[in-house]
Each structure stands twice: as structure tokens, then as C-alpha cells.
Amino acid sequence: MVEFFRNSNIDFLGKKWYFLAFSLIFSVAGLLSIFFWHGIPFGVDFKGGTLVYVKFAETPKLDHIRAAMDRAGLKDPKIQRFGEAGNNEVLVALEQRETSEAALDQGKNTIIRALESSEQQQAGKQDLNNTGPSSLQQYLLSKDPLHLGMDAPAKYLAIAQQVDDFRNKQHGGVLTSIDELKGVVPPEVLAAMQQDFYTSDFAVRNVEIVGPQVGGQLRKQALWATLYSLGGMLVYLWFRFELIYGVGAVVACFHDTIITIGFFSLLNKDITLTVIAAILTLIGYSMNDTIVVYDRIRENIKLLRREALADIVNKSINQTLSRTILTSGLTFLTVLSLYVFGGEVLRGFSLALVIGILIGTYSSIAVAAPMLVAYQEWRSRKTGRATVPAAGASREKVKAKA
Amino acid sequence: MIKNQTVKVVLIVAVLIFFLFGIFGIPQSFTPAGLLASMQQRIHLGLDLKGGTHLILQVQVNDAINADTDRAIERLKEDLKAKNVNYAEIVKPDPQQHPELIAIKGIPSESISEFRSIVADRLPDFDLASGPENSFTLTMKPSIVKDTKTKAQQQAIETIRNRIDQLGVSEPVIQEHGLGDYQILVQLPGVDDPARVKEIMQSTAMLEIRQALGGPYSSEQEAMQANGGILPANAVLLKGKNIGQRGSENTESYWVITRASAVSGSDLRTADAGRDENGRPDVKFTLTGEGGRRFYAFTSAHVGERLAVVLDNKVMEVATIQEPIRDEGRITGAFTEQQTQDLSLTLRSGALPAGIKYLEERTVGPSLGADSIRAGVRAALFGMIAVMVFMLVYYKFAGINADLGLFLNLVILLGFLGFTSATLTLPGIAGVILTIGMGVDSNVLIFERIREELRHGKTPPQAVDQGFKHAWVTIVDTHVTTIVSAIILFLFGTGPVRGFAVTLSFGLAANLFTSVFVSRVIFDSILNRHQRGEALSI
């Protein structure tokens, strides 16, 4: 039989000062970074701003792009490579102030114009790589190269879709010459397009523009979601166990949240909407872990009435240790696979989960369980007698009386 | 016992078939490609996976209030005139911030009771308050304000839907966006051309026919001078282009136009692109019965004066009223054919009652969506295989049990998505992956407990029984708390995050069934075949 941690007997509570030091170092480092260094690095979802993902036909030269942005008067845009190197993708990020109230997409349009003008100026021609199917349909309708009658809109739309599909599926989003459309569109259409279009060496693949109003609302919403979620669990644990169990578990989750956000701040990684979703998930996960230990403590308090609470807690952690390590290990494995294989878009999300699962597992052993003992010691010092917050047990007493 | 067991197995197989149907429906063919096609038909992908445009708009609901108060002022003026009540002025003190306020000054003392009865009679939607020196303030009732704003939002949603429908987008989402007040969410799968969409949507096409009081003037200064430096309180200065002089390009003129309109876009019944007698493109429209009656009254009262066709606060045409017009009219201008097509489309689909402002714009290119799916599926497969192999190695025969449960869990989860037409988003795929990881948690809890009981010297049947019994309490607690956080995510989250919450909750619910019920049935059927004293492979 393969088995880990059989009959382990580690004195976890004896190491509580190490745990405290470890937790303090990480939370304080995170908090220092939040307050004095990077702040909370909110992504475009929360802060507002413009993100434009540009795909180039060839390996992009970042300094050329930067120079073009400078010429267009864009202040301090963030320009970085995105995704796998072979994809030739670049992310250009603008701060909120580059999006104006009246025209949300002003920043995006400036970026596109800047990149277009940094290439050979093709006076009067439209850039095919940045023309969508319905705009192309409009163009074809106005030119009407095939002299179609009533069904012109539908026919030209179909041609425009074909061009779009051809560009996206067979040329990775960027055409290098109008001539590549030979055979894809009727010759009359091709001739018209050769007159009025040219191909730049890039295409805008994704755009995210968030105005300031939405960002503010989302920030508020994320904060409330986190607090409600913690509150909901406190109430559930209060109902299922005792209040102190709920408090211990919520403190542990709060600890995990602070440290995870602190990590993002230290690494200066953007906190996006999906990262918040990950943080809420890890609150659930950490809670899950804590409950497994608490359930064992509750069970053992009933079985081993004579023993001190500290010993019971230690014993319970050890009994559930193999399960804790196994589950965390397996969940960690899936999350790690998400981080490694899940692609660029999910990177922030999976990073939060990778950190969160490690911290969440640690906190249920090192924070949530010792809190019960600390609370009991504090109570007994105060009242002069030992009270065991035996969840369930107290309820049984009530039952016995009734 | 055996019979009972058979019933349970039948139930499990039924569940499996039911959810397989949820995923695939009745597939046209059983080849991998055919199955994939029917799966894609059943499971809706979110915008982040199939590409498209996502917009959040703010409806400028104050516009709708302003339109109502403008109309109320006109009505009040007419009634006061009819009853010979004098007044110094009737204005809106702050149309930007407080469109619901109307200030009336200089009502003679002897007419105040008459004035009050007119207001009570004719403007029931307003509260009247008196101020110093015979001045009064009319405030639109808060319930009416709220009602008007809500209606403006709903009408905006309807109007946008009509316009989008004419673009021929499949499965568009146009709905109230819960995050802020009077916001609309627009999602257009497969459209990666937001500029064109906005062009169609943003042309608010506020068509109005108003009275032209003065013009044309060649510049703003000239217009002001002609009116003694100050415009009449009921009028605004609007710009017009190429009016009355077609062919000559880009001549701008300024016109003094009344604030209130005789008829507006909502009075419109039809609008069609056509050509005028000279073969130039124009738009012909007809009015509704109500609108026609009002237009007739207006044109009868103003024969010989001029009216202006105003579209989005731009003067399109000015014409002298030759005779009362009932319900037909025409908008001419230096239009191209395409412009008249677009204009008639916007007019037909109804006018937006209020302007819109863009708050958020996202476009996902189709190729990025496809890349994301590939990466997500790859991560899910790797994660799942790793977990399954580990369970087999660590728990041997019981590992098969867990792996079967995991597989069934996945089938139920995807089947749920197929049945409920919930959308699968990229974070939703992550939710599936996380469910795989957390899904084995219940198995691990139970198996570890069974091992523990076996170590304490219990027989296999006893150990299995005790293991499930003890682990059950913990499993309920862990599932409930995670579902609590998923529900809160769903309530607060939007878009992709909601998709994540949905898959996570479904996955956990399915997990309760597979890891507790199914796993128990498998254990029991193994134990039934066991010889007494034979060891359990776990």
C-alpha cells in the first residue's frame, strides 16, 4: 500500500510562533507593498483604461512601436510582448486618462492610427487588416463592383465574411498583400479592393476599453462579494459549530486573501476580474480545508474528553494530515496544469490559485486550528476556568436537559 | 440487498445516459466529428471563447426627462395664453443636473388661483411649490421621474435590439446590465467590428419636427445679433448643412429653432428610402394617428411660418408650411443612397428616447477565442490525467472507483451545461478544471477514513460503512461553504465570472452524487463478491 504520513505525530501547536512569524512576514510584506510600493495593481477591469492586443505579420520591434506611440502623443504606454513568441503579438496598454468621456475608444483609434502611419503612408487607402466584415460589406455596397440588385447586401456580406475567414483562419489574422485574396473573392471585387485597400503589417486582435465609471462600480462590487462571502461562511460555521470556529476560519481566509493580494502587489501583476474570481474560489477552498480539520477536532473533543484542547487539536491535524496533503497536492496539480498549459489569458487567474492553494492549506493548519487553542487559553485566563469550546458537545448538553 | 443494489446501478446508468444526452443531444452521427458538432450545438460558448463584441452603454435618462419637461412647458404656455394668465418667464433652471425642475416667474397676484387650477388640472405629474415674488417651481413627481427613466431604458433596449436584429447577428444579448443604474449590456457573438455596430446604434436618430423661428444665418454671431444678443427662452440655435441649396457642397447655416417639437420619432409609423422628383435620394415617412392629429393642429396654427426637420439636433430641412399637413412627410438632404437606407432603418426601428454613452468596449478576435479553448482543454486534460493516474497508484482498486466517479462528474457537469443552456466561458473551463481537483477531495476523505478504520481492526464492510458515515458530515460542510462562495460570485459577478460560478456549483453538486452515492454502490458491489476475511484493495 502506498501511504504518506501514516501515524504522523508532529507537534504543530508547538511551532505556533514559527507559524506566526511566517504569516506576519508575508502579510506585512504584502501590506507594505500595497501601501508604500506598488499599491493594489488593479487591472483594466477595475482601474479603467485601454488594452489593445496587436498581432504583427513579422517579429515586432518594440522600440519602433514605442517611437510610433510617442509621435502620436500617447504618454507612457505599456508595450510588451504577449503570448508565445511565434505569435508575434504585442500588448499596448494605456492609462485611464487616454480614454475620454465622450469617445471611449479614442485611445484605441490613436494606437491604430499611430501604427498605420508608422508604415508607408498609403494616401486615401483603407487598411484591410483592420477592416471588419460589416465595414467591408458597406464598402462593397457603395462600390457595387458586381452590379447586384436587390440581394446585394446579403451577397456582399457573404463575400466580406469569406475575406474575414480567410484572413483569420488561413493567415493568422494578418494578410501581407491584397493579391492573396485571388481566388477567394470574384475578380471584379478584387480589382476594386486593390484600388481602395492596402495591407498594413498588423491587425488588432482584441480590445478592452473600460471607462472610469464601470471600474469604480466593479471595485466596489468585488469588495462586497469578498466580504459577503466571508460573512456567509461565518454564519454557516456559527450555525454548524460554534462562533469561535467561524471566527477562526474567517480569520484564516482573510489571512489568505491578504497574502494573495500582497503577492500580486509584490510581483506587480494585474488584478483582473478573473483574479477576483480566483480569490473567492480560494476562500471557498481554504474554508473547505479548515472545516476538515475542525470536523475532526469536534469529533475528537467528544471522544477524548479528558485531554487538553491543545493535544486534541494536534492529534486532529495529524489524523487529517494525509488527506490534507493529498487533496491539496492533487488540486495543486490541476491548478499548476492550468498555469502551465492554460494560456496567457488565464495566467493571472491560475497564479492566484497556485498561491492561494499553498497558503490556504497552510492557513488551516497554522492559523485556523491554533486560534481555537489561543481562544481557549485567553478565556481560561480571563475567567479562571478551562472552557472547551466543544461544538456539538454543548448542543448535546442542551438536548440532554430538554 | 442485491435487488436494492441493482436498482441503484440502474439509476446510475440512467443518470449517465441522461447527461450524455444533455451533452450531445441525439447526434447525427457517432463519428468523433459528428459528436463534436452536436456538442457544439448544445453547449453555448461565451463571448470570450467564440469571439465577438461586448459593449456596456449608459442611457442618458435625463434626456427623456428633459423631453417631458419641455413638452410640459409648451403645454403650460398654451393653457396660460388660452386663459389669459400673464407670466414673466417659464424656464428650466438647471436642465443638466435637474431636468425635472421648471421655474415660473411673475404670475400676477390676481391670477394665482387660476394658475394653480390650470397646473392641477393639466400637469398632474408635477408638484407645485410657491416661492418669493409670485414665483413658482414645478417639480416632476419622483415616482414619475423614476418611471420615465425606467421606460427610457426599456425603450432604448428595444430600439437597440431592433437595430441589431437588422444587422443579422445570431444570438445577440441585449439586456439590462445590473451593475449600475440605467446601463445596458450588448453582446454580439462573431462581430469583431465594433465601430460599425456603434455607428448603427449610436445614431440616436432623434427625429423631430420643430418650428423654425429665424434663419438662415451664416454664423453664430450673426444669429445672435439678429436676435438682439439673446435667443428667445423657448429656442435654441442649431446648425444645418446644405439646406435649400443642394449640389453646392458644405455650406453651413444656423437656425433659431424652438425647443419643443411638434412631433417626434415616437410618432413615426413608417420610414422608407426613396427618391424625390429630381431623382435624389430621400426618406419618406408617415405618422401615427395621434402624431398626425398633433401635426395637423400644429401646421394649421402655423400656416405661412416655417418648420424644420431636426435629426439628432441637426437641421436637415426647413420648409414653409403651405397648408395643414396631416400625416405624411419627407426628409431630404444631401444624402447618398446608403445614407438614406441607414436613416430609414434607424427611423423605422424607433428612435432612442435618450442618448447613450459607452462605458466599456471589449472585442475578442475569433482566433484568440479558439486559442483559449485549446489551452483550456489541454490544461483540463493534463490535470485530469495526472489526478487519475495518481489515484490509481495510491489507492489501487479503489482508485478505479474514484476515477469512474471523476469521469461521471465531468459528464454530469457538461450535461448540465447542455440542458440549461448556461454559457461556458474561459473562467468556466477553469471552473471545470478546479472541480476535477476538488472533486477527488471527497474521495480522498472517504478513502483515508476507510483506511483508518481498517487500521483499527474493523472488517472491510464495517470500515466502508464507518468511513462513509464519518466523512459524510465533513463533505456536506465543505460543499456547502464552497457553494455559498460560488452563489455570491454568481450574484455579484458579471459575464465570464458568472460562467465560472455556474460550472463550479454544478460541478460540486454533481460531485456529491458521484463521490458519495456512486462510490458507495461500487464499494458495496465489490464487498458483495468478497470472500469473508479477504482484504480490500484500497
Image: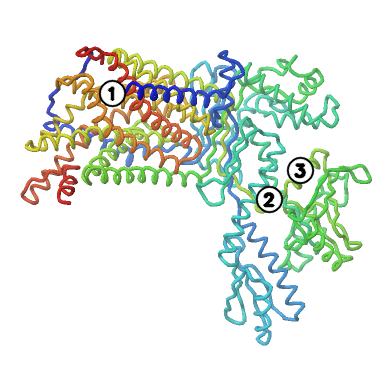
State the image coordinates of residue B532 (x, y, percent, origin top left): 21, 14
Q: Secondary structure at mark 3?
A: helix
* Residue sitting at x 15%, y 34%: A300
Chain identity of mark 1: B
- The part of the image, by quadrant, that contains residue B45 is top right
State the image coordinates of residue B503 (x, y, percent, origin top left): 45, 31
* Residue sitting at x 86%, y 30%: A149
Mark 2 vs mark 1, CA separation in Å: 58 Å
Front residue (pair B186, B172): B172
Circles 3 and 2 on the same chain = yes
Front residue (pair B23, A347): B23
Q: Which residue is mark 2?
A: B352
State the image coordinates of residue B462 (x, y, percent, origin top left): 21, 23
> Is residue A64 shown left or right of residue B474?
right
Front residue (pair A378, B206): A378
Q: Nearer the viewer, mark 3 or mark 1?
A: 1
Mark 3 vs mark 1, CA separation in Å: 62 Å
- The part of the image, by quadrant, that contains residue B370 is top right
> Which residue appears farthest toward the right when viewing the image?
B277
Chain identity of mark 2: B
Disc 2 crowd, CA 10 A, few/some/many (<14, 14-19, 20+): many
The three-letter code of the residue at mark 2 reads Leu
Q: Which residue is mark 1?
A: B444
Identify the colour scheme used: rainbow
The three-letter code of the residue at mark 1 reads Val
Where A281 sits versus B327, above or below?
above
Q: Secondary structure at mark 1?
A: helix
Q: Secondary structure at mark 2?
A: loop
Quarter of the C terminus of chain B within the rendering: top left
Report the number of discs. 3
